[in-house]
Amino acid sequence: MILGLPADSANATNRVAVLMQCVVGVAGFDKHESLDRPAIMPILIPTLLGGGLGALGAALLPNLYLKPVLLLTILTMSVIILLRPDVISPPKGTPTQSPRENRKAWWGLFGAGIYGGFVQAGVGFILLAALAGGLRYDLLRANALKMACALAFTLVSLIVFIFFGLVSWIPGCILAIGTMAGAHLAVKIAVRASQNSIKWFLFVMTLFAVAGGFFI
């Protein structure tokens, strides 16, 4: 938007970079055996349903009220990390659940899909809350599944935005080069970091996201 793209076009163009970031991230986590393949399909069902609805909403409606929702969501998550770290960072050995077993997590993933399809920014925090807090995955595996979810609903969103002619391909591809490099580096760091380090890194990033949101 700072470069002059309208909000709807910037929202759509960003998906090119997010899609390529997720491709690199998912491949990297899978290579390091951190991606729970059997869990992907049950988790993708609610996120894809939500993502399609969210993308249609973004293409047809103005996104006037998303900034306060985004800031409140991220701020709430940072408070949870600080006061109840076990919610987002389950103890080692905690058994995981399926969305079929935890309906709240199913609806959380559906809501994350709607939000991610609509605007994308900050959706990773919401997905981590559903995957780590709801389905009890450790942060490493939750991060890998988060990338798989984002890949799926971003692909759906991008198809919708292309149909409505909202994607600017040159800035989208330039941005994609940066996000792919970032994802490649981030996976290498994540698979070597401790659960506690990932948790506190996530906490710091939520604060940066909230602070940055006030200046956008």
Image (cartoon, rainbow, N blue to C red):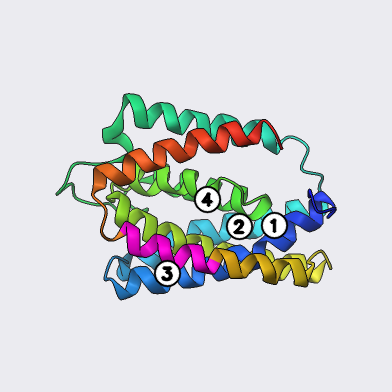
Callout 2 touching callout 4 (CB < 8 Å):
no
Which residue is located at x 24 percent, y 41 percent? Answer: 90
80 within the magenta span: no
Amino acid type, callout 3: Val
Secondary structure mostly seen in magenta is: helix
Q: CA distance from mark 1 to mark 3?
A: 22 Å
Per the image, the residue denoted by label 3 is 26
Q: CA distance from mark 4 to mark 1?
A: 13 Å
Nearest the eye: 16 or 201? 201
Percent coordinates x, y for residue 94 in the rendering? 18, 46
Residues shaded magenta: 180-190
Q: CA distance from mark 2 to mark 4?
A: 8 Å
Which label sits in the foreground, 1 or 3?
Answer: 3
Callout 1 touching callout 2 (CB < 8 Å):
yes
Per the image, the residue denoted by label 4 is 110
Percent coordinates x, y for residue 38 in the rendering? 31, 69
Per the image, the residue denoted by label 2 is 51
- Give the label on residue 55, or none: 1
Is residue 98 something one can see in this rendering? no
